[in-house]
Each structure stands twice: as structure tokens, then as C-alpha cells.
Image: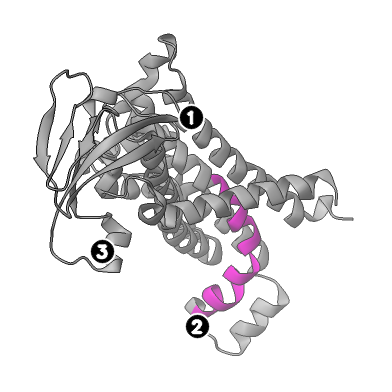
Amino acid sequence: MNSKHILANLCVGFICFGSFIALFAYFIAPDNTANANTMHVTIQAKPPGFTTYMLQETSMTEKQSLWNKFLNGNNSYIKETPISQEYQITETSIHYKPQLQNDFLTIAKTDQVKVIQKTFWLGTDKYGRDLLSRLIIGARISFSIGVVAVTISLIIGLLLGAIAGYYGGFVDSVIMWLINITWSIPTILLVIAITVSLGKGLWQIYVAVGLTMWVEVARVVRGQTKSVKNLQYIEAAKVLGLSDLRIIIKHIIPNIIGPVIVISASNFAASILVESGLSFLGLGAQPPTPSWGIIIKNHYNYIVTGKAYLAIIPGTLIVLLVLSFMIIGNLLRDKWDVKNND
């Protein structure tokens, strides 16, 4: 196995691992409440591996379905109070001293009240939230933006590119004019304009990023369609009386899908970067949604205060994920490039 295969396997493994984490985020994250937004102001910005005792009070709520928990996390309200280790439990009550306080408090002992020892494996953020849980649930944002944006770009790009390449003439000129106009506008500015028009939020980002990435797909599909539409099997399909739509869907697109997959891998990486950048600017996912870009925005000033990991960890995850998709895209391009095949 050569170095390219090893690198490809590592990238595919990292993406598969990240996809699994994103898909089952609320079943994996230590803090599985919605958006992992449980705050502990007395233990903010603690280092990785920080351990403390927690007085945990759970409020009973309506029974939650597994599907709802999969999508939105645990809807039970769990109040956690960091306490010192100088607590006492009797048959009827719990005596505890909250962090940063000197006085003991007392609470009745029930089935909904207990003391646990909790470890924050990657520490806490500036609001005292579990950084690991925020990163795990934030992975869902990064992967979902890639999937939705690439899907939108494929639907529009395949449709317009195939029509332009197949029919040519005036239709091709109109579509190419639209492609060139869209292509001439910087991606980040176009996304910001669409986001401002539609409003701030996740679905607006999905639409905005998808609407800016279809042009490259359309250009590739157009060129590939023009190169195959006069081949013998396409002419035979026309002679048999097949409709243009069937020819495009059944005979042209399946034979040009290789370059489209390569473009999709690059667009997936680009969409993650765009979402992270918009979230950093405050135009993407809105708090308390744990996007990696928002986590960096909240903690980039900690880089000079000795707690740089709060911004470096999410930044590293973005780099690794984008790099994995770019490497896979380059390897797929080499695989489908006949000039590089022996």
C-alpha cells in the first residue's frame, strides 16, 4: 500500500468518524441537553481534565421520544451546581458548599437530587459549558452544512449544466451568462448578501451557501455534456426515440458523474469554511447553537491569555475536516484523470 492509499484511508476514516460523532451527537456528548448549553459561571475557562463535584437537580418533564432526543437532545431540565468536596449526605438532606462560597447550604434529599463527580475532558468555555460537548454537537452543524449545500449545488448545477451543454445555442448563452454573473461575485460577499436578505439562522446559511456553489458544478457538467452528447450511444438513444430528459438523466449524467463527485468533495470543504467564517462574523449560526466558528469567535482573545486551546481546538478540527475532503477530492481527480492512468 503506497503513501497515497494510506493518506486516503486516514482521511476517509476521519470523515467517517466525524460523521458518526455528528449523527449521534446527543447520545455521545457528556452534556446532552439542547445545544450543550448548561452553564456554570463559577468554573468558567477551566483547563482540560478539570474535575469537580456537582449537585444535580433534575426536573421531571414529559416523556421524550428517541427521535426527538436524537434531533434536539435531552429536554429534561437539569440544574447543576458546582460544589466543593466538603459536602455531607444524610438520610433526609444534603449539606453542600457551592464553589467560591464559604457558607453551607442544605437541600432535601430526593430521587431527583444527587451529587456526582464530573470531569470536563477538554475543559470549560468562558461560560462554564463543557467544551467537549459543544464541539461534538458543533460537528453536526459542519457536516449538515456540507451535505445540504452540496445537495442544493448538485440539483441546480446538474440541471442547468446539462441543459446548457445538451441544447447549446441560445439556451447555452443564457445559462452561461447567468453562470458568469454569479461567478464574478466573490463567494463570501454573495453569501453575506443572501444571508442578510433571508435573515440570520441555520437554514438561511444552508440556502445561501448552496446557491453560491452551483456555478462550478454547472460549468463542469456543461463541458462534460458537450463532450459526450455526440457520442454514438447518445445518437443511438435519439434514434430509438428516447426523450431528451431521459437521455440526460439516464445516459449522460451517469457517465459524467466522476468529475462531479470531485467538485462535490471540494464544495463540501468550501461550505464548511464559509459557514465557519460567517459564524465567526456573527452572520451564521446564532447562539447558543454550538458552531465551531462561534466557539472560535467567543474565545479567540484567549489566545494571548494562556488558554489558547479554547480557540485552537475548534480551529484544528475545521482544518482537519477541510483538509480531509480536499485530499480526497484531489485523489479522486487523479483517479478519474485518464492522463494520469497507466
Is label 3 in a helix, a strand or a loop?
Answer: helix
Q: Which residue is mark 2?
A: 243
Q: Which residues are magenta?
A: 246-266
Q: Disc 3 residue type?
A: Asn
* Residue under pointer 1: 313
Amino acid type for the residue under numbered disc 1:
Ile
* Quadrant hosting residue 230: bottom right
The extreme top residue here reads 304
- Is 71 on the left or on the right of 273, as rendered? left
Q: Where's residue 14, x and y in %?
A: 60, 48
As drawn, 308 above or below 342: above
User: Would you call the spot at circle 2 few (<14 residues within 10 Å), some (14-19), or many (20 or more)?
Assistant: few
Foreground pick, 327 / 341: 327
Residue wearing tag 3: 68
User: Distance from label 1 to label 2 (Cα)?
Assistant: 53 Å
Viewer can see residue 248: yes
